[in-house]
Image (cartoon, rainbow, N blue to C red):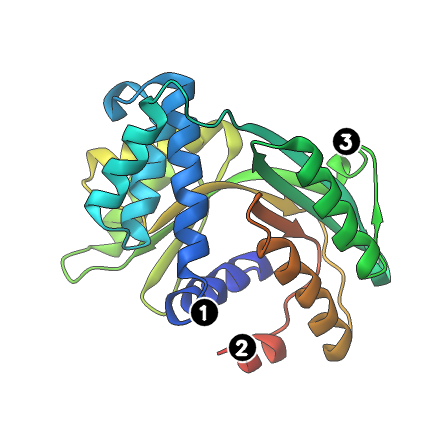
Amino acid sequence: MSGHNKWSTIKRKKGAADAKRSKVFSKIIKEITVAVKENGFDPEANPRLRLAISNAKGASMPKDTIERAISKGKEKDAASFSEQTFEGYLPNGIAVYVECTTDNQQRTVSNVRSIFNKFGGNLGTSGSLSFLFERKGIFAIPVTEDMDLDDFELEVIDSGAEDITAEDGMITVTTLMEDFGKMQKKLEELKIEAENAELQRIPHETITLELENIKKILRVVDAFEDDDDVQNVFHNLEITDEVIAEME
């Protein structure tokens, strides 16, 4: 299993057990609101909303909370969100890509810049790290008792699966960005619900550091993720088995 998939697995386990669940819900609610304002409140006609609702269910968000988020997006005076991305370097040459959704761009810029400065990083210009990352679709799918893994693999390969890994009762399917929608539709046809599905920025190459330096970088990643405006943080740090053992 590749480094980014390992770390996604650890974050999912960790998120289910710690107090960050409310922040996870907050980010999903924001995504639902943006999706509704962008393309309407009918999930059948709004793929982005359908995906956000699917991720909400995967995070065990209560049905009434999902419905309130959809209703909030319908309101004319609902906050108007915009999406921003930030790119830069952390100590030891680690590249980081921060995706935000905000109703106050000035606040978001200030907060992100402050985190870079606080931890000895450097905020770069937009597009400066695009050559280091590639956007790919990542689907985390729980293994069920009635699932035939061989049949499942054949189905998703036909729909553009680039990589399939299975570990700890979870299948991770990776697709090219342009095949993301096709894979989403295939899973719907198979009546398979992903626990999480999203476009991630996957590094072409990763950097390996000593354990203590890895921990320092992950503290910066946590600082970004703790900000309410931050939706996703991607980096090119290699997550070693030693680190994963400590996180479990």
Q: Residues within 10 Å of mark 1 (few under 14, many from 20)?
A: some
| Disc marking residue 14 | 1
Q: Which of 59 and 154 lies nearest the eye of the viewer?
A: 59
Give the CA separation, mark 3 to mark 2. 32 Å
Residue 36 in percent (x, y) is at: 36, 24
Marks 2 and 1: CB-CB under 8 Å? Answer: yes
Q: Is residue 192 left or right of residue 162?
A: left
Locate residue 20: give its quadrant.
Answer: bottom left
Q: Residue at image x 70%, y 62%?
A: 220
Give SS at disc 2: helix
Q: Residue furthest front?
A: 77
Q: How crowded is the residue under tag 2: few (<14 C-alpha within 10 Å), some, or many (20+)?
A: few
Q: Position of residue 48 (x, y in %)?
A: 39, 28
- Between disc 2 and disc 1, whose residue precedes? 1
Above or below, 221 against 55 in this view is below
Earlier residue among tags 3 and 2 = 3
| Most foreground residue, 44 or 201 | 44
The quarter holding residue 92 reads bottom right
User: Residue 230, position in %: x, y?
Assistant: 58, 45
Numbered label tally = 3
Residue 192 shows up from this direction? no
Q: Residue at x 36, y 27 (%)?
A: 73
Which label sits on residue 247?
A: 2
Q: Position of residue 224 (x, y in %)?
A: 64, 54
- Give the mark, 1 or 3, whose residue is nearer the N terminus: 1
What residue did someone put label 3 on? 127
Quadrant position of residue 217: bottom right
**For the residues bearing labels 1 and 3, Cβ distance under 8 angstroms:** no
Of the residues shown, which amino acid type is indicated by label 2?
Answer: Met
